[in-house]
């Protein structure tokens, strides 16, 4: 009797494991829905339009920020400059716009060029010089953050322009933030890059097996450097949108996005070792992270308890998703 | 005689520690030049420098052990704050003596290390992500125990920590030597070799009859002990408690190890971490004196402290880049050595063949 029970349990666990490994994106969405359900059951007031709007808003921002991280991770790298580049992008945006309309194109060009420059630096340091991606991108992100402090003297400069703020925060159908319209541009670009372009295929190959890819005539260094450039450019643009959402910009305001985007991407089924992963998964992972934060806020736990809960949930998610192979396998 | 020195230098040049050592010497010279050699070499300024940076240096040692065994810990900085909080609060709330408080602090640090080992080695989570999640948990625990910075330590203890024994030997140097001796002891046991085997390749180590889990646990426990000692030093240094200090030590200690020439697993030695850590400390010191010099030289010159941070972070980044120049030479030397050995073997083999014929 006991035996059959345990056998049944094993198969159920195996089923769950198999399902997670096969479709991490769907699993992330299921967990997110469950978490939101629990939140609503415990705090009924959490179910309102403005809460849903803010969840969509933050999910979109995090999924834009995760886009680059996904591509970099698939190619076998890691990018910790996401947060710093976003903050820098936001600061550049508010400084150039200075609360007036009509500077959008100028801002866009400056933000994209400067973040692409940082991405290029990341790429050269990791690929050409051969430093560990984690360490060198952290060092660069420190330098970028310090630079923003030096340039702004630590206090916020200017505001985003009213029209730009409107284009990010006004609501469609009463609850969808108009940031989603930017998504209509960014999502197709990222999907095209990853799944339909030549570069996308090369990214997967390089991440899967660097040597094999090189022997097949792929310029692996170029591909890897390009992933960093794409990641930084996307982060810079996300920072710009973030400035529209927050209206003004502070130094290090988006610092948390570096690790949050990484966790979202991992929860979405992308492997740290590279070669495996989807952007759909990352979007689902971003939703999960945002819903989790929203839940901890809605339950009105004290800050330390919220931190502990966040840590425990993240570790449990990692246990569900991303385990390295056993020594005996 | 000179030949022997030259030979020893050549041998040292091939060790992994050479990278960090050259950077360290460079920083040292720079610091001495800017601060003035007499001032820099005075026991008093050395005492201040070591006492304020000893916690960081010990943390770097802990991080080096983890890197050697092929894992890492980003939460190591906030663990320092945990030890600090536990020591101060047990003394304040439970009325225990300072030494018992220290024991509690070290126990807390060991417990966290074991928890982290469970997630890294038993659940096989990527160390970076697991320890990052742990940062949240530890920060929460810290603030739960001590909501706001508070508490104090008996005067005797923190005065002793700052003291110059006989006017020349800083007390913190004794603590540092004590920690070095602990490491020296463990290095000489079987663990000292196993750590390299497991760090280089866990599978091969397992096949050779070494238990990677056990070796990793040992590494985590030693790291826990070191973090405990570092936390006590931090408590003595600040003479009070702060639940959210030292968080950036995690990333900084990692950079220090990499600058010193440690790789992710199986490559490098404790000396690498120590030189890398010292490099960071001295560079920060140098940058501080550099700006004070500028204030003196140029009347009306004034910049915010943001500039200090910016310049030292740029130098840290350049230090990382410098590693590659030295490491490249080192790898070249290693490859040449291997090639030479292989050639020799081939010749031996050829010789034998010849004699047979």
Image: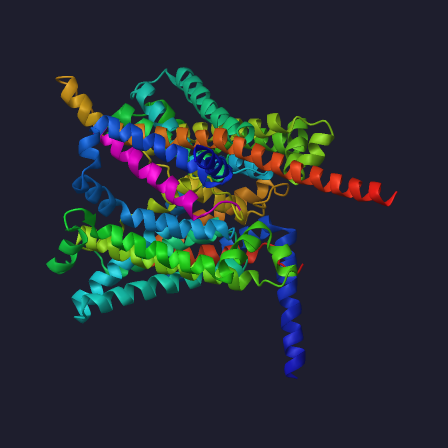
Side of A156 where B14 appears, left or right = right
> What's the colour scheme?
rainbow
Magenta stretch holds residue B283: yes
Q: Position of residue A40 (x, y in %)?
A: 41, 57
**Residue situated furthest left in the rendering:** B155
Main secondary-structure element of the magenta-colored stretch: helix
Q: Is residue A108 above or below residue B47?
A: above
Query: How many numbered tags mark residues here?
Result: 0
Q: Quadrant of the N terminus of chain A?
A: bottom right
Is A45 covered by the magenta stretch?
Answer: no
Looking at the figure, which quarter contains the C terminus of chain A? bottom right
> Residue A282 sits in which quadrant?
top right
Give the residues drawn in magenta, as a range: B267-289
Q: Residue at x 37, y 16 (%)?
A: A103
Indicate the position of residue A216 as horizontal and vertical percent values.
74, 30
Residue at (61, 33) in percent of width and height: A191
Asked whether residue A39 appears in the rendered view, the answer is: no
Which of the 4 image quarters holds residue A241? Answer: top left
Residue A328 lies, in percent from the top left, at 65, 61
Q: Position of residue B141 (x, y in %)?
A: 31, 60
* Residue A21 appearing in the image: yes
Single out the residue that lies furthest toward the bottom. Answer: A1
Q: Is residue B201 left or right of residue B128?
A: right
Q: Is residue B185 above or below residue B295?
A: below
Q: Which residue occupies 28% across, 67% down?
A: B103
* Residue at the far right in the pictured view: B357
Given residues B56 and B132, the one toward you in this image is: B56
> B11 or A248, which is in the foreground?
B11
């Amino acid at each position: 009797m006991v035996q059959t029970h345990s056998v049944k349990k094993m198969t159920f666990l195996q089923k769950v494991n198999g399902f997670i490994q096969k479709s991490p994106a769907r699993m992330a969405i299921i967990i997110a829905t469950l978490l939101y359900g629990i939140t609503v059951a415990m705090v009924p007031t959490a179910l309102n339009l403005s809460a849903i709007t803010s969840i969509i808003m933050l999910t979109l921002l995090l999924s834009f920020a995760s886009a680059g991280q996904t591509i970099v991770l698939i190619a076998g790298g890691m990018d910790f400059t996401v947060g710093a580049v976003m903050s820098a992008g936001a600061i550049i945006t508010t400084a150039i716009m200075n609360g007036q309309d009509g500077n959008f194109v100028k801002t866009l060009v400056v933000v994209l060029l400067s973040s692409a420059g940082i991405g290029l630096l990341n790429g050269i340091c990791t690929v050409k010089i051969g430093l560990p991606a984690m360490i060198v991108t952290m060092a660069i992100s420190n330098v970028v953050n310090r630079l923003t402090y030096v340039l702004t003297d630590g206090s916020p400069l200017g505001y985003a322009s009213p029209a730009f703020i409107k284009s990010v925060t006004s609501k469609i159908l009463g609850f969808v933030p108009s940031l989603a319209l930017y998504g209509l541009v960014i999502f197709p670009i990222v999907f095209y890059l990853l799944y339909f372009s030549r570069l996308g295929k090369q990214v997967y190959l390089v991440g899967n097996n660097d040597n094999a890819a090189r022997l097949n005539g792929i310029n692996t260094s170029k591909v890897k450097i390009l992933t960093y450039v794409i990641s930084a450019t996307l982060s810079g643009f996300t920072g710009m949108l973030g400035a529209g959402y927050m209206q003004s910009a502070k130094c290090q305001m988006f610092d948390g996005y570096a690790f949050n985007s990484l966790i979202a991407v991992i929860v979405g089924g992308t492997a740290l070792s590279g070669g495996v992963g989807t952007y759909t998964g990352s979007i689902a992972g971003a939703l999960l992270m945002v819903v989790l934060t929203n839940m901890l806020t809605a339950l009105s736990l004290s800050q330390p308890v919220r931190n502990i809960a966040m840590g425990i949930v993240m570790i449990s998610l990692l246990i569900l998703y991303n385990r390295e192979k056993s020594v005996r396998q | 005689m000179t030949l022997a020195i030259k030979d020893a230098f050549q041998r040292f040049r091939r060790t992994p520690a050479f990278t960090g050592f050259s950077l360290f010497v460079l920083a040292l010279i720079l610091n001495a030049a800017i601060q003035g050699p007499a001032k820099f070499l005075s026991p008093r300024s050395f005492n201040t420098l070591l006492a304020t940076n000893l916690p960081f240096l010990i943390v770097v040692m802990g991080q080096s052990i983890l890197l050697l065994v092929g894992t890492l810990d980003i939460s190591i900085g906030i663990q320092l704050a945990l030890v600090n909080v536990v020591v101060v609060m047990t003394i304040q709330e439970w009325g225990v003596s300072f030494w018992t408080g220290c024991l509690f602090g070290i126990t807390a640090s060991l417990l966290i290390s074991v928890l982290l080992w469970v997630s890294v080695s038993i659940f096989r989570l990527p160390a970076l992500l697991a320890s990052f999640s742990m940062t949240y948990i530890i920060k929460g625990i810290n603030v739960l125990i001590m909501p706001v910075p508070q508490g104090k330590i008996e005067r005797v203890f923190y005065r002793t920590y700052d003291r110059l024994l006989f006017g020349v030997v800083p007390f913190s140097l004794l603590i540092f030597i004590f920690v070095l001796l602990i490491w020296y002891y463990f290095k000489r046991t079987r663990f000292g070799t196993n750590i390299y085997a497991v760090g280089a390749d866990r599978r091969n180590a397992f096949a050779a009859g070494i238990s990677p889990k056990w070796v990793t646990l040992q590494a985590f426990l030693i790291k826990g002990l070191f973090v405990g000692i570092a936390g006590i030093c931090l408590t003595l240094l600040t003479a009070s408690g702060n639940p959210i200090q030292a968080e950036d030590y995690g990333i900084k200690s990692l950079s220090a190890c990499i600058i010193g020439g440690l790789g992710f697993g199986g490559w490098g030695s404790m000396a690498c971490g120590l030189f890398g850590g010292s490099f960071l400390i001295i560079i920060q010191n140098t940058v501080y004196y550099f700006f004070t010099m500028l204030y003196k030289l140029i009347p009306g010159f004034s910049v915010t402290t943001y500039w200090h941070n910016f310049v030292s972070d740029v130098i840290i980044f350049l230090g990382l880049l410098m590693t590659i120049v030295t490491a490249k030479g080192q790898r070249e030397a290693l490859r040449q050595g291997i090639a030479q050995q292989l050639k020799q073997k081939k010749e031996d083999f050829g010789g034998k063949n010849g004699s047979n014929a």
